[in-house]
Image: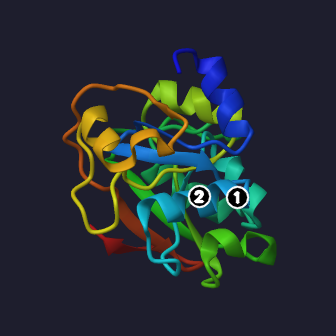
Amino acid sequence: MSTNSEIVETLRAGGVGVLSTDTLYGLVGSALLPEAVERIYELKRRDREKPLIVLIADIEDVERFGVVLSEELILQLEKYWPHSSSAGAEALRGKPGPYSVILPSVDDEFSYLHRGGGTIAFRLPDKDDLCELLRDVGPLVAPSANIEGKHPARTVEEARRYFGDDVDFYVDGGELSGKSSAILEFNGDEIRVVRE
């Protein structure tokens, strides 16, 4: 799989693949397609009760998942996410690390994402080409590219050892040595740290 348009087409059709995110290699699929999400659970052999993080291109994308986006929430999110195209948003000062923020989702339609917990974790990656892909294909789930309990793949070769021909594409982004994102939770008034 060589071109961006092929990758977009594959993801829109419910395919899954491996590519580099702003942290680690991710096993990616459309967050809007339950069948793609379930395929990722099967490939990773992931605990079915553990929700996945959703990568988004813009703050407004959270509204697609039943999240009520208030002015207060936008102000809070802009403190942690590196860039945003939300109306009136100012460029964030400094460059924070990668943060995933858990937000309440009021829509049962997305129980395949929140796994009955009523919340979904979102991250706006600080990686231009990834955000461009997200704008083209829509939000993606992107757990680390590994079998549950194994070390996250640092290279495409390691990811291939986990998944072989069971995924639809691999995109080589070189060797990655990033860490998982910090996880924060918005409780209506403030954001608290769940994982450093």
Amino acid on which the number 1 mark rests in the picture:
Glu
Residue at screen point 52% across, 65% down:
41
- Counting from the top left corner in percent of width and height, residue 147 is at 34, 60
Numbered circle sitting on residue 39: 2
Q: Nearer the viewer, residue 135 or 7?
A: 7
Residue at screen point 71% across, 48% down:
60
Q: Could you tell me if residue 137 is visible in this image?
A: yes
User: Considering only vertical position in the picture, is 9 above or below 118?
Assistant: above
Q: Nearer the viewer, residue 93 or 122?
A: 122
Amino acid on which the number 2 mark rests in the picture:
Arg
- Counting from the top left corner in percent of width and height, residue 145 is at 37, 49
C-alpha gap between disc 1 and disc 2:
6 Å
Q: Nearer the viewer, residue 68 or 79?
A: 68
User: Considering only vertical position in the picture, is 143 above or below 126?
Assistant: below
Which residue in the protein does label 1 denote? 35
Q: Nearer the viewer, residue 167 or 57?
A: 167
Residue at screen point 23% across, 41% down:
154
Q: Could you tell me if residue 124 is visible in this image?
A: no
